């Protein structure tokens, strides 16, 4: 099985010029770093990596710029392409790349903070979809304007053959709001979509159990941004309530662009000096380090944008009491394994009560059951096995092969129509011949036109 893996990559990417690229701490990069070593244990799997950058190596595999995907496919065809898409400023390119050659697209977000990078803002993807489904439909008008109705990954989820979601809520929302991909007409199941959680590294499960000594300082790990929908202000209000009676220290993990807002919130709530330490790098690596010195983890969020994985899974794997907001994906977690807080006016009071109960030893907590659940749901080995099974079953299905054949024929027809239009244009304007040969033909090759 030959796989093209198109994604942000971990920071240990070395380019051909031997200079080290600093990658982002994106979920796609994290997932790649965790899963690729597992996938390479299968003798019948070969992988080539693609990213937005130079050619080089990563995880002992060859790396290519994503613009060379079609070139590499023509030289040695892939059985399947796997893309990772997320709402991250360094992952905008993936929203372009994931439609180059439809395959499996693994969505870590379905709703985005923006409509996407400029090249797709005026995309006529609905027209292209209609023509694919109904060959008599016309191509989009040149120079037309096409508004994107909502910051949802409708274009990206439509132009894949199989959508995969790391949050179950997003899979359900996909069926409700989007309804189907290119492969839908060829599938026996209506709107097929799969759920595969983000992986959690094995070492978190083998960490030493937390110290349950009553009366000691309560060490709190807070995973939250500083915006109102991220509910950190409610946590700080709860801490201000318990402050006189409860001895605590907080390690608050935020992204770098949230640091100034977080500092402003800390000044507003006036907690005792030194009670809160800001960790201004949000990544699974940093969160794992914070969990090592924590007795409780808090993951508040009340928003359709973003989610709390893999961080909640990591907290459960570590065996610490875990507090979440009863909303979205967090609401689906087993109530006996996490403390679910109702968003609203009672939020600070509920958080304060849970923290006080945990500190006094009165709060029910079964670390073993939480770890068992996390191992079943999120363990890196289990996720890798499920992903390989999905890839192999997809490649071997007649539905997938029929969808690929239909799309390839559609692309061939579209390419012929485009070349005919370009030929007529060059015949009418001979001066455009040189620019076409030097630039436009290169673009055609990259995008398979």
Image (cartoon, grey):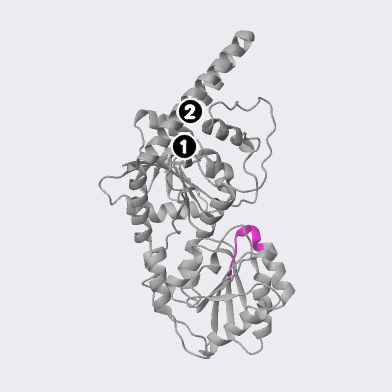
In-image side of 421 versus 348 (left or right): left
Q: From this viewpoint, which residue is outermost toward the right?
A: 268
Residue count near mark 1 (Cα–Cα under 10 Å), binned few <14, some 14–19, many ≥20: some
* Number of marks in picture: 2
Residue 234 percent coordinates (x, y)? 67, 74
Residue 341 percent coordinates (x, y)? 60, 75
Asked if residue 219 can be seen in this view, the reply is yes
Tell me where residue 44 sits by quadrant. top left
Residue count near mark 2 (Cα–Cα under 10 Å), binned few <14, some 14–19, many ≥20: some
Asked if residue 272 can be seen in this view, the reply is no
Q: Which residues are magenta?
A: 252-259
- Are dots 1 and 2 in contact, CB under 8 Å? no
Report which residue position mark 1 lands on: 65
Q: Residue at x 36, y 47 (%)?
A: 391
Residue 357: numbered disc: none
Q: Which type of secondary structure does the marked residue at label 1 adopt? A: strand
Residue 183 percent coordinates (x, y)? 46, 40
């Amino acid at each position: 099985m030959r796989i093209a893996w198109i994604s942000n990559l971990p920071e240990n990417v070395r380019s051909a010029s031997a200079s080290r690229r600093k990658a982002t701490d994106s979920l796609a990069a994290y997932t790649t770093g965790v899963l690729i070593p597992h996938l390479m244990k299968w003798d019948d799997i070969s992988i080539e990596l693609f990213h937005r950058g130079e050619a080089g190596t990563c995880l002992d595999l060859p790396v290519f710029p994503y613009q060379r995907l079609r070139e590499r496919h023509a030289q040695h065809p892939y059985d399947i392409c796997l893309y990772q898409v997320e709402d991250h400023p360094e992952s905008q390119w993936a929203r372009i790349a994931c439609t180059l050659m439809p395959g499996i697209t693994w969505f870590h977000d379905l709703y985005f903070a923006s409509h996407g990078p400029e090249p797709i803002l005026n995309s006529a993807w609905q027209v292209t979809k209609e023509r694919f489904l109904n060959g008599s439909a016309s191509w989009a008008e040149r120079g037309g304007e096409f508004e994107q109705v909502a910051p949802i990954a409708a274009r990206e989820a439509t132009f894949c053959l199989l959508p995969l979601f790391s949050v179950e809520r997003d899979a359900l929302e996909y069926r409700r709001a989007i309804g189907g991909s290119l492969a839908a007409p060829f599938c026996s199941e209506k709107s097929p979509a799969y759920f595969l959680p983000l992986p959690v590294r094995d070492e978190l499960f083998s960490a030493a159990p937390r110290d349950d000594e009553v009366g000691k300082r309560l060490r709190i790990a807070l995973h939250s941004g500083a915006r109102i929908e991220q509910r950190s202000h409610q946590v700080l209000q709860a801490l201000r309530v318990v402050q006189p009676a409860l001895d605590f220290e907080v390690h608050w993990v935020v992204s770098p662009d949230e640091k100034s807002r977080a500092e402003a919130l800390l000044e507003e709530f006036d907690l005792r000096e030194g009670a809160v330490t800001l960790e201004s790098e949000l990544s699974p690596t940093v969160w794992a380090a914070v969990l090592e010195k924590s007795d409780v983890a808090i993951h508040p969020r009340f928003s359709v944008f973003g989610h709390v994985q893999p961080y909640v899974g990591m907290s459960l794997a570590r065996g610490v009491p875990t507090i979440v907001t009863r909303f979205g994906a967090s609401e689906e977690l087993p109530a006996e394994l996490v403390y679910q807080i109702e968003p609203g006016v009672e939020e600070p009071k509920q958080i304060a009560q849970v923290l006080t109960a945990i500190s006094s030893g009165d709060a029910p907590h079964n670390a073993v059951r939480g770890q068992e659940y996390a191992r079943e749901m999120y363990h890196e080995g289990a996720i890798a096995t499920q992903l390989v099974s999905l890839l192999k079953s997809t490649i071997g299905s007649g539905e997938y092969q029929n969808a690929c054949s239909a799309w390839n024929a559609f692309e061939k027809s579209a390419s012929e129509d485009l070349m005919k239009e370009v030929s007529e244009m060059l015949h009418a304007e001979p001066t455009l011949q040189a620019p076409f040969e030097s630039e436009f033909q290169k673009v055609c090759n990259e995008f398979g036109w």
